[in-house]
Image: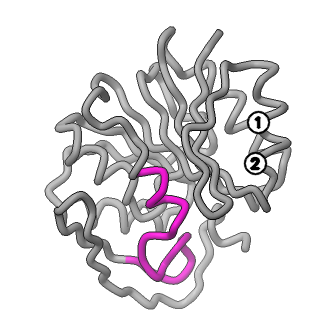
Amino acid sequence: MNHYFTNSDIQHDIKKHTILFKGNDYSFYTDNGVFSKKGLDFGTRTLLENLPFEKMSGDILDFGCGYGPIGIITSKQTKEKVDMLDINKRSLTLAEQNALLNQADVHIFESNLYENVDKKYDYILSNPPIRVGKKTLYKILFDAKKHLKEKGEFWLVINKNQGAESAIRDLKKEYLVEVVCKNKGFYIIVLKIH
């Protein structure tokens, strides 16, 4: 599972998938060594279906963008430029190709956690890499605070089987936490600064 967040040399198997979302077709190239290579996974789709696109404006970050579905679809839905980051070079290459393919207004960059993030956001969006382990996951979740504007919101999806309930309990120590949706074990969570 290390391949989601390291830059490995596994063999390529590039496939093109078309995703229907809110009446629009989006096309995405995927490959071995990236998350959800068979197309849009259920957790990401559930997150996208719950994002309040109509009110989203300003600075938006897709954290751990993978091949780009969250940031690209959000950019197209909101007409905003979206920043997208990942640590996996293969993911970043695919995200660049997919941004061109979907004519999305995005800025894609490499970053280990928030290392190369130099501004604050109105919205941070993520299907975080649970398999990095709790210590790194909590760094992603709790350090987001430093990169949110005063009224900023961090929208994320975590599966119940991957610790959603304990994460919510811990996050309540630092954030106002709202669970906006539960769907087949996936929790869509919004974090706001007190």
Alpha-carbon neighbours of circle 1 within 10 Å: few (<14), some, or many (≥20)?
many
Q: What element carries label 2?
A: helix
Q: Is mark 1 on a helix, strand or loop?
A: helix
Q: Which mark is residue 168?
A: 1
- Quarter of the figure that contains the N terminus: bottom right
- Name the spot of residue 190 as percent of width and height, x first: 57, 32
Residue in the foreground of this view, choosing between 189 and 71: 189
Residue 17 position by quadrant: bottom left
Q: In this view, does 168 lie above or below 192?
A: below
**What residue sits 68% from the left and 27% below the top?**
143
Hey, what amino acid is under mark 2?
A: Ala
- Name the spot of residue 124 as percent of width and height, x first: 48, 34
Q: Decide: marks 2, 1 in contact (CB < 8 A)?
A: yes
Hey, what amino acid is under mark 1?
A: Ile
Residue 176 position by quadrant: top right
Residue 27 position by quadrant: bottom left
Q: Is residue 178 above or below residue 40?
A: above
Alpha-carbon neighbours of circle 2 within 10 Å: few (<14), some, or many (≥20)?
some
**What residue sits 43% from the left and 45% below the top?**
50
Q: Residue 46 carries which label?
A: none
User: Magenta stretch: residue 37 in it?
Assistant: yes
Q: What stretch is highlighted in magenta?
A: 30-48
Query: Does residue 72 appear left or right of residue 150 in this picture?
Result: left
Q: In this view, does 76 lie above or below 8?
A: above
Residue at the spot of label 2 = 164
User: Magenta stretch: residue 92 in it?
Assistant: no
Residue in the foreground of this view, choosing between 118 and 46: 46
Q: How far apart are marks 2 and 1 (CA)?
A: 6 Å
- Name the spot of residue 181 as percent of width and height, x first: 56, 45
Q: Is residue 21 above or below residue 81?
A: below
